[in-house]
Each structure stands twice: as structure tokens, then as C-alpha cells.
Image (spheres, helix red, strand yellow):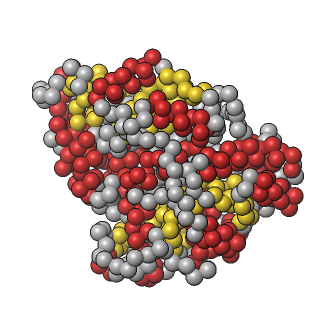
């Protein structure tokens, strides 16, 4: 059966019963229909939990599939089977990849969060609220310029972009305000995808609504004619933008097929944003359950690095264990096997491609956090291939366990869950990658050399000018969010495995003072993706009874 068919055949519990499993009262949830709810914050005082945090990450993604979300869900269900009080914390899917090339983000097979159709489409409206808030601010900026421009905003230096939650390459670079004097002031503009927006980052990094409001006020929307930054607070619309997000900042409660409570909230991409679900979601899960299992987007070089260097300082909690997901198929691709030949046994290619997994193991251990490898099993995997991965991991002092979660759900991950529980008890002192007082160049160099395995960084002339400007403005202390292809450790998407001797090319920076990080755009990375030749949308349909098909 397909993922959507498995999900549609499942019997969900009323969300009130799911809430009860983690001690949420009727007054602490706001129902969105029968099977979804928002959690009202702050929660009332309750007994302290163990507050164990498990971060699930992966090797670099390939067309072969890795199944990070599937493993996250299956692992959570396995914890439930072992009678552990557990919650899962995932990101919300974006319509861009759902309708594009990736499909949904609710797991797969018998390791899914449900209702998957709702979660993958409109859900509780968080993405729409973010899109509306973002574009309201854009409209207010342009209206300010049109109505006399008291702040002397230089329309050539407005950096706040409009957004849309769908991949649309035609909107990357546009001209607005055409049509005469009454149609606004003409200027060049562009669209980002909603999940790459600063408001998405702010939503995911805010500790409460007051913090949300403060961060929104700090957003730099552009510069005046004296080249000084202009903020939302100066524009005087902080309150208006915040109120549009007051409900969106509440975490969303759903369940797995096995009825394990799951929070799905916030959805930044890890290749062009910081790739982690919300601080509020993770914190809520930590307060309600003994074990919180969360994930970070794409490979460990992107999502996990950003989780550890950007999110944890705000969260105030570092992972007790990191789980790295890998598949034999993906390692074979990293070892040079073509996609069409992945069903054929090739132990040598697995060994060759292991270099990619080895890099991620080493980079995560650099933070002094225990690492467990989850080998996500596919039907065509052979015993010899799986045994080779286990052997190679053992040679690198890392435990690797085969998990068959797509086919068996939580039952396919009980051994993995036991290993993770054991690993969580190894108290180790977290080691930061860089300090806030390191220069921006030093921070990026550490990411490139110690996480990617590269030789260093090359900055464009524009990036160098920006660095000098940031130093004058006192923005050097901020962490760096690397916008880099997810497919490679380098900034060249076609270079698989574990390349050496490469440099990362930073072409420009985007300061995001509300999110409190600096985005470094590398290579040819885009903040508004395009749809593929055959989008996933081509295979979707709905019948006369409203039953959806083709969503995966």
C-alpha cells in the first residue's frame, strides 16, 4: 500500500485522548477539528520530567531516499512500546516540496504522523499566517515609501522580500509599482518561499509571544539614504505583524499511527534557513515527556549543525544523543552507483560511500554528544550490505542498528530505541563549535573545516564589503546560518561522498536581526525553488467524496 492509503485506513484517537497521554488538560488545548489541536501556552506547573532530548539527523540526501522523518516517527513509537513517556517534535511540511519533488513530510509506511493529508496541506493555517504577516509588512513598507517616506528608506536597498509557500521560479526577481503615479513607487523586488523567510525563523526561535514581538521589532527591512539600517520598530508596525502570528506561535498536537503524541510546528528549510522546528514545540515536549525525539532538516552538515549552533543556545538544552539516519541505497549512490542500479547488491559501493556517513559521525561527535547510527532498511537491501555498514560504524567506535520502520512501525525500531535510551544516560559535556565573540569569518571557517571537511572559505567582493559593514554595526556576535546545497558537503550539488580539498564560496550575506543570525549564501543556492519537470502535483487528485489520492 501507498503511504496515503495506509494513513487513510488507520483509526485515529480523538485528539483529546492523545493529549491526556502526556497530561494535557482540556483547558490546555484548542481543538482544530477532531484530530488536531493547538497547545495553549504557557502550561500550568507540573512534575519535572527527565527532559531527555534525542536529535535525529541524516547523511546528505539522495534520490535513493534516507527516511529521516520515517525513522523519527518509528523511533518514537518504539519508545512507546517500551513504555517510555515520549513525544515527537517535527517540522511542518511546506506546499512547495509537497507539490514539487519531495512529497509530504509526515514519515512513511507504518511510521507516519496523522492526519497526513491535513498536515501536508493546510493543517492549522500556520504557513498561511506567516505568508500573510510577511506580505503585510511588505505592503506597509511600500506604503510608507509612497506616502512620503519619513524614514528616508532607500527603495534600492529594501531587503525585505515578499513570500509564497509554493515553488515559483518566475517570482524570484520582479519589478513592482508599475502603472503610474497612483500605483506605488516602482522598484525591483523578489519573492522567497515562506519557509525561508525571517518570520519563519523568528516563529521557530521565539521563547514566547513577548520574545516573538521583540524579534519582529528588530527585523531590518532595509537601509535609508545614509546607509543606516531601518527596523520594523522604526516603521511602527511591530504590534500589527505580531498579532497576525499570535495563534501560529502555538504548537500543533497530532498523533502517529500508533497514537504516540506528536508536535508538528514550524517548517524552515535547512538548506536556505535554519531547518529546525520551533523552540516552543521542543520545550513543550521536554516539559511533558521524559524523552523528546526531534529532527533537523537534511543532512547533519546543515540541519544538525544549525540545531546545535543556532537553536540550542535559545532552547537552553543540548541533545543527549544524536541519531544519524543512513540507508544502504544512499551509501551506494555516494559510492558511485547510478540510481537505476541501486537494487543490485554492491558491498564495495557501500564501503566506498560510507565516507559520507563517516564524515557526519565525526562532525557530530565533535560536539561531544553520543552518536547512534540508524540504518533505515529498504526491501532490496541485502544482509551483506547491512552487515558492512554495521561493521564500518563499529570500526569508527559507533553503534549502528538496522531499523525496519516503514514496514513494521515501532516494532521495527525497538532495538534502536534501547540503544538510544542507553546512550542518553551517557552524560557528556557539550562542546560548542564556535564562540559568539569569534569573527564571522572564523565562524564560517570552523563550519567549513570541522563540519563539511573543506579547506576554507572564499568571500566575494560584496560579501567582504558586508562583513566590514556588519563589524561597524556590531552584528559580528551573531551565529551564522549557512545557505548551502543539501546534496553535498561542498557547495557543488554534484560532488557526492566526502570530498576533500574544496572551498566554500560565500557570495553574499543577508542579515536577519529578528532571527538573530546572519545568512551566508553560498554557491548557486536559491531562496525560491522551482518546480521539477514532473511535479508531484501531477499525480494528485480528489474524488467526489473528498478522498485525496497521490499525496505521499
As displayed, is residue 449 above or below residue 79?
A: above
In the rendered image, which quarter contains the C terminus? bottom right
In the rendered image, which quarter contains the N terminus? bottom right
Q: Residue at x 35, y 44 (%)?
A: 515
The x, y position of residue 76, in whole percent, is: 57, 70
Q: Residue at x 73, y 61 (%)?
A: 400
The x, y position of residue 80, in whole percent, is: 57, 78
User: Is residue 284 visible in this depiction of the protein?
Assistant: yes
Q: Residue at x 44, y 47 (%)?
A: 310
Q: Which residue is at the front of the view, 281 or 526?
A: 281
Q: Residue furthest top?
A: 461
Q: Image quadrant of residue 389?
A: bottom right
The x, y position of residue 500, in whole percent, is: 69, 31
Q: Which residue is at the front of the view, 1 or 94?
A: 94
The x, y position of residue 98, in whole percent, is: 53, 51
Q: Is residue 63 left or right of residue 8?
A: right
Number of labelled discs?
A: 0
Q: Residue at x 49, y 22 (%)?
A: 459
Q: Is residue 440 left or right of residue 532?
A: left
Q: Which residue is at the front of the view, 277 or 526?
A: 277
User: Is residue 120 visible in this depiction of the protein?
Assistant: no
As displayed, is residue 551 above or below residue 163?
A: below
Amino acid at each position: 500500500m501507498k503511504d496515503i492509503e495506509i494513513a487513510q485506513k488507520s483509526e485515529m484517537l480523538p485528539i483529546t485522548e492523545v493529549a491526556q497521554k502526556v497530561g494535557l488538560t482540556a483547558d490546555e488545548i484548542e481543538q482544530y477539528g477532531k484530530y488536531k489541536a493547538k497547545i495553549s501556552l504557557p502550561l500550568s506547573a507540573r512534575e519535572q520530567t527527565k527532559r531527555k532530548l534525542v536529535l535525529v539527523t541524516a547523511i546528505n540526501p539522495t534520490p535513493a531516499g534516507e527516511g529521516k522523518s520515517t525513522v523519527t516517527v518509528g523511533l518514537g513509537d518504539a519508545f512507546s512500546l517500551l513504555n517510555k513517556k515520549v513525544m515527537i517534535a517535527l517540522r511542518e511540511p511546506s506546499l512547495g516540496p509537497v507539490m514539487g519533488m519531495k512529497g509530504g513530510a509526515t514519515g512513511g509506511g507504518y511510521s507516519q504522523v496523522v492526519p497526513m493529508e491535513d498536515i501536508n496541506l493546510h493543517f492549522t493555517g500556520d504557513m498561511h499566517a506567516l505568508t500573510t504577516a510577511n506580505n503585510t509588512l511588505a505592503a506597509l513598507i511600500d506604503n510608507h515609501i509612497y506616502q512620503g517616506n519619513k524614514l528616508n528608506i532607500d527603495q534600492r536597498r529594501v531587503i525585505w522580500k515578499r513570500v509564497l509557500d509554493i515553488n515559483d521560479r518566475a517570482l524570484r526577481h520582479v519589478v513592482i509599482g508599475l502603472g503610474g503615479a497612483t500605483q506605488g513607487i516602482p522598484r525591483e523586488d523578489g519573492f522567497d518561499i515562506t519557509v525561508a523567510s525571517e518570520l519563519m525563523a523568528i516563529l521557530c526561535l521565539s521563547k514566547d509571544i513577548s520574545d516573538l514581538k521583540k524579534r519582529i521589532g528588530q527585523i531590518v527591512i532595509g537601509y535609508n539614504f545614509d546607509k543606516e539600517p531601518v527596523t520594523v520598530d522604526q516603521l511602527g508596525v511591530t504590534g500589527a505583524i505580531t498579532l497576525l502570528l499570535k495563534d501560529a506561535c502555538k504548537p500543533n498536537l497530532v498523533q502517529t499511527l500508533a497514537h504516540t503524541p506528536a508536535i508538528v510546528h514550524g517548517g524552515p528549510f535547512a538548506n536556505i534557513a535554519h531547518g529546525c522546528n520551533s523552540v516552543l514545540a521542543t520545550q513543550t515536549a521536554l516539559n511533558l515527556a521524559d524523552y523528546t525525539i526531534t529532527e533537523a532538516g537534511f543532512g547533519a552538515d546543515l540541519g544538525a549543525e544549525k540545531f546545535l549552533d543556532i537553536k540550542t543556545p535559545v532552547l537552553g538544552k543540548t541533545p543527549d544523543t544524536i541519531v544519524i539516519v543512513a540507508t544502504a541505497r544512499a551509501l551506494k549512490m555516494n559510492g558511485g552507483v547510478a540510481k537505476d542500479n541501486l537494487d543490485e547488491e554492491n558491498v564495495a559501493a557501500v564501503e566506498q560511500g560510507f565516507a559520507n556517513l563517516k564524515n557526519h559521525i565525526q562532525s557530530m561527535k565533535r560536539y561531544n554528544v553520543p552518536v547512534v547510527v540508524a540504518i533505515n532498511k529498504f526491501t532490496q537491501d541485502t544482509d551483506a550490505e547491512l552487515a558492512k555498514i554495521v561493521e564500518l560504524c563499529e570500526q569508527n567506535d559507533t553503534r549502528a542498528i538496522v531499523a525496519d520502520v516503514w514496514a513494521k512501525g515501532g516494532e521495527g525500531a525497538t532495538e534502536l530505541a534501547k540503544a538510544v535510551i542507553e546512550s542518553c544516560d551517557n552524560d557528556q559535556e557539550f562542546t560548542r563549535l564556535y564562540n559568539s565573540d569569534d569573527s564571522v569569518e572564523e565562524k564560517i571557517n570552523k563550519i567549513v573545516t570541522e563540519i563539511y571537511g573543506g579547506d576554507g572559505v572564499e568571500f566575494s567582493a560584496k560579501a567582504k564589503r558586508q562583513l566590514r559593514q556588519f563589524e561597524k554595526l556590531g552584528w559580528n556576535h551573531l551565529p551564522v546560518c549557512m545557505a548551502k546545497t543539501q546534496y553535498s558537503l561542498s557547495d557543488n550539488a554534484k560532488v557526492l561522498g566526502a570530498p576533500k580539498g574544496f572551498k566554500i564560496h560565500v557570495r553574499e550575506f543577508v542579515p536577519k536581526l529578528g532571527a538573530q543570525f546572519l545568512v551566508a549564501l553560498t554557491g548557486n543556492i536559491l531562496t525560491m525553488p522551482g518546480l521539477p519537470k514532473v511535479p508531484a502535483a501531477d499525480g494528485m487528485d480528489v474524488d467526489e467524496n473528498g478522498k485525496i489520492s497521490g499525496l505521499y
